[in-house]
Amino acid sequence: MKKTLKAFFPIAEGIQRLLYPHAEVVIHDINKNKIVAIFHPFSKRKVGDSSLLTESEMQAVEDCMGPYEKLNWDGRKLKSVSSVIRDEQGKAVGMLCINLDVSKLEKMNRFFSEFMQFAKITDQSHALFKDDWQEKINHYVHRYLNKYHLSLESLDREEKKALIEHLHKVGAFTGKNAALYIAQILGVSRATIYNYLEKENV
């Protein structure tokens, strides 16, 4: 076996460990058309098996091919990429293939797509909880954050002050305990809220 191929064994194993248990990584010897290494095999193949590469695949001009779709023996869908291994003279001597099992991800994607079918969800603004001032505050806050490309977790003192002033202007403090609720959202005291508002009205 060429030293060039052996040099890729730790790389292949590292990829498999990172993506475990969802990836199988295979190294093929192009000249012998055989598998010389396989990490976390779930395709029922083993070292020494034929690579089943065609003549055109063994003479591939692209150094990286894919991702492309494959089907495992048990029906699981795989997303695969193949990279050509070349020796010091640039001759193709091997191929490293990563087969990623995406069947579980597909199931999760279908689940979330079905779960998030908003067409079947009642428009809350015209149904229950029309006077939910907490949700109104949530909308005010996040519309403001989206407009100025801010995140709640990273607001500094001045940004919190500006947000509180904005919430006052749009009428977010009309609820009985609105100041306390906004203080909890922003991680400040209620006294801080009132202090900012007093300065705004001076």
Image (cartoon, grey):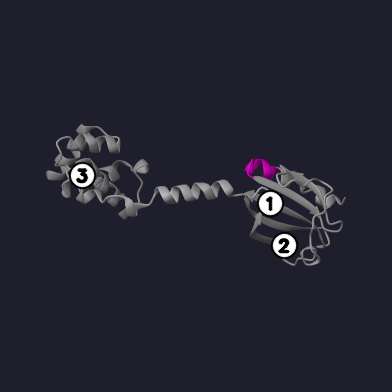
Magenta residue check for 15? yes
Tell me the mark number nearer the camera, choosing from 3 and 2: 3
Q: Residues within 10 Å of mark 3 (few under 14, many from 20)?
A: few
Q: Position of residue 2 (x, y in %)?
A: 86, 52
Would residue 148 be visible to someone looking at this image? no
Q: Position of residue 78 (x, y in %)?
A: 63, 52
Which of the two residues, 21 or 71, is positioned nearer the viewer here? 71
Q: Amino acid at mark 3?
A: Leu
Q: Position of residue 46 (x, y in %)?
A: 79, 45
Which of the two residues, 104 or 161, is positioned nearer the viewer here? 104
Tell me the mark number nearer the camera, choosing from 1 and 3: 3
Q: Which residue is mark 2?
A: 63
Which stretch appears magenta? 14-22
Q: Residue furthest left?
A: 202
Considering the numbered disc 1 on the image, is that residue within a helix, a strand or a loop? strand
Would residue 38 be visible to someone looking at this image? yes
When asked about the image quadrant of residue 30, the answer is: bottom right
Q: Residues within 10 Å of mark 2 (few under 14, many from 20)?
A: few
Q: Is residue 18 left or right of residue 139?
A: right
- Disc number placed over residue 189 in the picture, else none: none
Q: Is residue 180 left or right of residue 72?
A: left
Contact between marks 3 and 2 (CB within 8 A): the answer is no
**Could you give the CA–CA distance between mark 1 and mark 3, rounded to whole angstroms?**
51 Å
Q: Which residue is mark 1?
A: 98
Q: Amino acid at mark 1?
A: Ile
**Quarter in which the C terminus is drawn:** top left
Up-down relation of residue 63 to residue 6 (above or below) = below
- Disc number placed over residue 128 in the picture, else none: 3
Q: Mark 3 or mark 2, which has the lower sequence index?
A: 2
